[in-house]
Image (cartoon, helix red, strand yellow):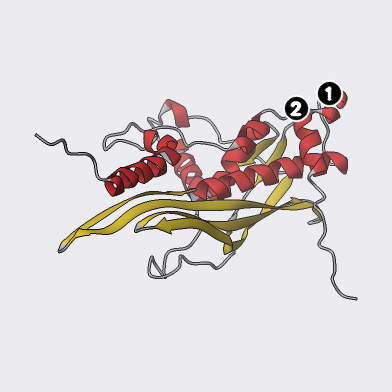
Amino acid sequence: MTQRHLHPILFCAFLSLGIAGCMSLKNIETMPADESETTLTPRASTYHDLTNLPKPKGRIVASVYNFKDQSGQYRPSPASSFSTAVTQGATAMLVSVLSDSGWFIPLEREGLQDLLTERKIIRAALKKNNTPKNNDEQLPSLLAANVLLEGGIIAYDSNIRTGGLGARYFGLGVSGQYRLDQVTVNLRAVDIRTGQVLSSVMTSKTILSQEVQSGLFRFIEYKRLLELEGGMTTNEPAQLCVLSAIESAVIHLISDGLKKNLWQLRDLDAMDHPVLKKYRQAHAPARLTSTNP
């Protein structure tokens, strides 16, 4: 009997597919199952910086009415020409970030009309008999803010950088490509009494998309074609990048306010805190140089 050996082309094909699979093995292992459990939203490194800020002398009462999408960008066709490129829930993100920072006491302003309606219902119940115990006391006045936080998502730029690399020999090929998008947010603190803009910062976060592919296209013999393909595509969630940009903006706002003596630390020696030092050094970005003679 004669022994049959694996065709060299098949061996190379399986080898290339294995290499492509190993390049994305980490992503494959973390792919959710069909019935995956609900988990907390993953956070970037900026969240660790946010929650490790030194404590303030006193928390700042702040209100956020609307932190909306001002980029005007929609998802490119043919995906959708009606869906926006970025999340419309940036206000909820900002309120959550302010609360997690430990520096602010955010007030409910986005749903202010709903809050006022509920207070009217309670006042009406006070005038009647058999009022529930949770509604039998006079309502206190709503808390007023010291600082108004304004801004929004001001830009979304697609394909700010693209690239790739590939090779093909004898019908066997491996290729990879990537694309970078960028989202920019603006956050400013406004004095309620005077309307003066106390501090304003802009932060940007890139959104990475990458693809790895390998394949084989080869005629083995007459009327017999061998074709193999494999690959993996990963895309950073745009909403998580927006969330990271907002977290960075809040930290920069705190750092800039400390520099301008708008608010103070509980421990004055904490000005050399690693997180504050890191963001203070990055607060003044390098300027573009002019090429005009």
Residue 223 sits in which quadrant? Answer: bottom left
Residue at far left of view: 1
Q: Are marks 2 and 1 in contact (CB under 8 Å)?
A: yes
Say few, some or many: other residues with alpha carbon within 10 Å of mark 2 (under 14 / 14 to 19 / 20 or more): many
Check disc 2 and give the amino acid type.
Pro
Label 1 secondary element: loop
Residue under circle 2?
54
Where residue 86 sits: x, y (%)? 51, 57
- The residue under label 1 is 267
- For the point 45% across and 41% down, the residue is 23
Q: Earlier in the sequence, mark 2 or mark 1?
A: 2
Q: Vertically, is 29 above or below 197?
A: above
Q: Say if residue 144 shows up in the picture.
A: no
Label 1 CA crowd tier, 10 Å (few <14, some 14–19, many 20+): few
- Type of the residue with mark 1: Asp
Q: In the image, what residue occupies the spot 60% across and 44% down?
A: 244
